[in-house]
Image (cartoon, rainbow, N blue to C red):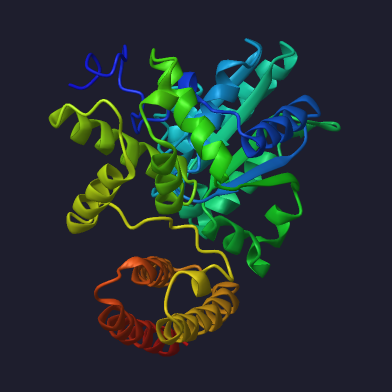
Amino acid sequence: MYCSFYQFKEKPFNLLPDPDYLFLSSKHKSALNHLDYGLTDQTGFIIIIGDMGTGKTTLLKHMVRNLDESVQVAIVFNTNVNPLELMQMISREYDLGGNQDNKSKCYDELYDFFLDQYALRNRCLLIIDEAQNLSPKNMEEIRMLSNLNVGKDNLVQIILAGQFPLKLKLERKSMRQLAQRITMDFVLDPLGQNETREYILHRMKVAGRDNGDTLFSHETFEKIYQSSGGIPRLINILCDGALIYGFADKITTIHANVIDEVLSEKKIRGQFYGNSHTREGDIKERVPSTISRNIRAVSRRLEIMEKQFADFQNTHYDHTIQKLEKLLDQERAKFRRAVYVSDQKDVSIKVLKQRVAELAERIKKQR
């Protein structure tokens, strides 16, 4: 719609992970170097962790595109499945059909495939994206695959990519055996302010416009960084929205007030909550002190419940526990969202506390 008006050959801020548009910031270069080294050295598990929208999937697609043809790759994106479905998906990704009706048959099928590829001097790589959603049972299935080896050589290398809850899962006592096999891990942080500007200019250049710095004012770049926290997906949302607004009003230079209009619309429609990167210590800078205390109190409750839940889960893996884990993840998501909803923070905290209390009662009853 706005491409011709702004001299683009295609939309520069598409939300789909496209390796053609990969911007190698200092963080992304470092992550890519870690991946390259891990693959070359044929290490065990490689872990990539980052917030939603930081570019994990785009980075992985770029890496896969540049792999040697001798590397057989399977990529799994849907991790909300049972163990049999997971094994079938992995088999299908290796073009093995994935029609086996039990895990043992899938396992044997994969083992034979890995041995055949090893004999041909090919390497096998398994990438699990959205790995934070893997259940404990699925984590165990992945660990079992990593046991396959010939002498000192692993038959398959495994990359787990996911959001920060993946780190929490790997720190549980029940995950000790898997965690001990991790030989390389990397946290993909958001972009800095200068990198945010370079990222925007890079995407516009790839889309066909070399003079992108004349399209966005200096204040606009600053506003986009402050509003997105340097998370590429949020940057794309803001920039695409700004170009739509600018085209509608036939504006040749996008100023910060246009970003304000986009933010207002996205928040009203529930599409934008700003920077979701909520590491410890960040909350104080984003909310008033009273709300901050409430948030921290809920955070402490969640931390205690996570520890209790992890201890409980060391000896229980039934369906009820998985449901409770999902509920806990939902409460954590609502906790994060409460930080950014500016007009109803107190109400959000109150509701969140009630839900936390309900979940605590559920865990207590399970004992």
Confirm whether residue 19 shows in the render.
yes
The image quadrant of residue 113 is top right
Examine the rendered structure and indicate whether residue 261 appears above or below residue 362.
above
Question: Looking at the image, which is closer to me, 161 or 326?
Answer: 161
Report how many numbered discs are placed on residues in the image.
0
Q: In the drawing, does residue 221 fall left or right of residue 312?
A: left
The structure residue drawn at horizontal position 74% and vertical position 14%, both measured from the top left corner, is: 119
Q: In the drawing, does residue 106 fall left or right of residue 117?
A: left
- Of all residues, the one furthest to the right in this rendering is 152
Q: Position of residue 316 (x, y in %)?
A: 52, 73
Question: Looking at the image, which is closer to me, 207 or 201?
Answer: 201
Q: In the drawing, does residue 114 fall left or right of residue 260?
A: right
Question: Looking at the image, which is closer to me, 171 or 28?
Answer: 28
The image quadrant of residue 343 is bottom left
Q: Position of residue 233 (x, y in %)?
A: 40, 41
Confirm whether residue 191 shows in the render.
no
Looking at the rendering, in which quadrant would you find the N terminus?
top left
The structure residue drawn at horizontal position 41% and vertical position 67%, both measured from the top left corner, is: 336
Q: In the drawing, does residue 161 fall left or right of residue 83?
A: right
Q: Position of residue 163 (x, y in %)?
A: 51, 52
The structure residue drawn at horizontal position 72% and vertical position 57%, both measured from the top left corner, is: 177
Question: Looking at the image, which is closer to me, 258 or 12?
Answer: 258
Examine the rendered structure and indicate whether residue 66 appears above or below residue 319.
above
- Of all residues, the one furthest to the left in this rendering is 248
